[in-house]
Image (cartoon, rainbow, N blue to C red):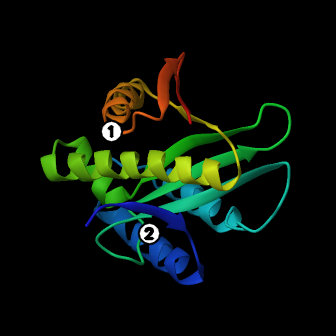
Amino acid sequence: MACRMKQFDGSTLASTEKAWLADIPKCQNIFPGHVEMVLDLAKSKNDYAIDKPYKQMAYGVFDKSPNIAQAVVDVIVTKQGKKVAKMLDCHIRPSILDKALVGSVSEVMEVAEAYIASVFGSLEVAGDNNLAQLKVYGRSQELLSVLVAVQTAIGKKRKSLKASIEGRWLVLNT
């Protein structure tokens, strides 16, 4: 089953929060305050129907469990001035990230799949908002390296997309 980014609803948000908070005591390399910050983002930025010139939204990336997000994706849509969608961050579920940080190959692959799903899901959000450009921020050197690989993969898979790296941003134009 492939990962897919979708909107949170009350059930998926509650299940995700419960699972992520239960992960914290089992994780060696995760900062609990960061997990709580991500969950607060998901709870406060899930009014997808709001129609404003600028809006920030949180989406979930789902795979194995249709109710528990593997990642929370932070997306901003701007419809005034420079009309663009930006994927600011992809926050991976604590239990997955913790194992990936210590080198578990299967969890590293889950992280990669979640990032790819978040990029393609953010492209859908851009399209749904009639925007022709998506920018994905490479917050860390590791993520920037992933984005360079995504740029290469996108060029091979979707010829209709123009992908480039501009500073710390992966820029996708349709």
Q: Nearer the viewer, residue 153 or 174?
A: 174
Which residue is rendered at x = 30% and y = 45% of the image?
Answer: 112
Considering only vertical position in the picture, is 68 above or below 132?
A: below
Which residue is rendered at x = 19% and y = 43% of the image?
Answer: 102
Residue 1: image x %, image y %?
A: 25, 67
Which residue is rendered at x = 59% and y = 50% of the image?
Answer: 74
Q: Type of residue at label 2?
A: Leu
Which residue is rendered at x = 31% and y = 50% of the image?
Answer: 113
Residue 173: image x %, image y %?
A: 57, 32
Q: Which residue is mark 1?
A: 157
Q: Rate crowding at label 1 as few (under 14), some (14 to 19) or many (20 or more) other CA atoms within 10 Å.
A: few
Q: Which residue is mark 2?
A: 21
Q: Nearer the viewer, residue 147 or 164?
A: 164
Q: Is residue 28 visible?
A: no
Label 2, secondary structure: give it: helix
User: Can you name the residue that lies furthest to the front here?
Assistant: 160
Considering only vertical position in the picture, is 126 above or below 64?
A: above
